[in-house]
Image: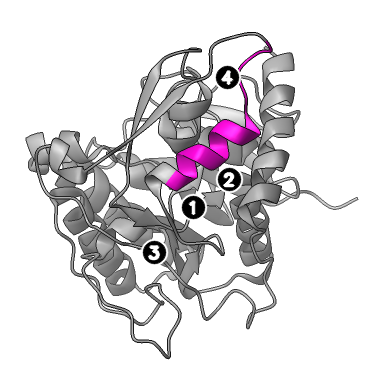
Amino acid sequence: MGTQPTLLLTGATGLVGRSLYRAAFQRWRVVVVTHRRAAGVLRRGDSAVAADLLAPGAAAALLDAVEPQAIVHLAALAALPACARDPALAQRMNVDVTARLARGAARDGCHLVFFSTDQVFAGDRTWPPDRAPGYREPDAPAPLHPYGESKVAAEHAVAASGADALLLRTALVLAPSADGTSGALDYVRGAAPGSEVRLFSDEWRTPVSVLDLARVVDAALERRLTGTLHVTGPQRLDRFALGQAIDAAFPVAEGAAPRRLLAVSQAELPGVRPRDVSLASDRLAAAGLPVPQPLAAALEELRRFADGARGTR
């Protein structure tokens, strides 16, 4: 049996990275980059390496030490309020670190998969009647906030590096969280029985399961896919309707008071949020990549996945 190729994974302790590590990369020997949080349970043959990617020279030293054939770069300052409070840190984490990894990948001939976001778009489009809603890969980004701006700058840095790279823009990712309350899925799933859950009725997304995302990433790595790719669920719905679907898929215990879902407006929060960053993809099916499943099936698969994660603690 041949030696497995090495994949360097950043952001594996985050919301998406944690589940992605569990579900993907079975054909790789994965080296997980850690900094402030431990890597958790690793699969046999995988390893963790501590590195502060913000430190000068850290990215180049890491690549020299690991010598990966592929990099999956998820690490980011992703919270909109945090980026708004400290845009300089967002620049350092989201742009500078990405640029250094991309230059290293170009130097070493390493395949880079960089995770971007639907938040690079303004969300103010009116979709013509002859076109299904959703931003497609060629559409020009126009971010409304520092997080989106940093991700667009990072995309440009990757393109300028000359690396053999895939810019992977994800829709809202549904994934179970480590604390049981973070992210779009667990904001509802983890809410206490009888509690009030406030959800936007005027913000539209095309949510995708982390398990569907994992299948796409595996296939893209195998084919060494490059360019820009949107990974998006097939259904466009507002956050309140999404919350209703999650609530139905993850009901409270029998006899407990139901959660109380309340439709609210984006105007309740400070700052500017895109209204409709629904994504569409012209590349997924055309490239023969796995197409994400409808929401009901995705939530059922996530329920089994989350139950399995709970059983391993």
In this rendering, is residue 173 above or below 137?
above
Q: Is residue 251 magenta?
A: yes
Alpha carbon separation for disc pair 2 and 4: 18 Å
Image quadrant holding the C terminus, namely top right
Q: Earlier in the sequence, mark 1 or mark 3?
A: 1
Q: Earlier in the sequence, mark 2 or mark 3?
A: 2
The number of discs equals 4
Q: Nearer the viewer, residue 299 or 241?
A: 241
Whether residue 64 is visible here, answered yes or no, is: no
Q: Which residues are magenta?
A: 241-254
Whether residue 205 is visible here, answered yes or no, is: yes
Residue behind mark 2: 210
Pinpoint residue 171: horizontal percent, then vertical percent.
44, 56
Query: Dot 1, crowdedness within 10 Å: few (<14), some or many (≥20)?
Result: many
Residue behind mark 3: 278
Pinpoint residue 86: horizontal percent, then vertical percent.
9, 36
Callout 2 amino acid: Val
Residue behind mark 4: 40
Is label 3 in a helix, a strand or a loop?
Answer: loop
Q: Residue at x 8, y 34 (%)?
A: 85
In this rendering, is residue 146 above or below 222?
above
Query: Dot 3, crowdedness within 10 Å: few (<14), some or many (≥20)?
Result: many
Callout 3 amino acid: Ser
Q: Which mark is residue 207?
A: 1
Nearer the viewer's eye, disc 2 or disc 1? 1
Callout 4 amino acid: Gly
Q: Is residue 109 magenta?
A: no
Q: How is the image coloured?
A: one colour
Q: Which mark is residue 58?
A: none
Q: Earlier in the sequence, mark 2 or mark 4?
A: 4
Is label 1 in a helix, a strand or a loop?
Answer: loop
Q: Earlier in the sequence, mark 3 or mark 4?
A: 4
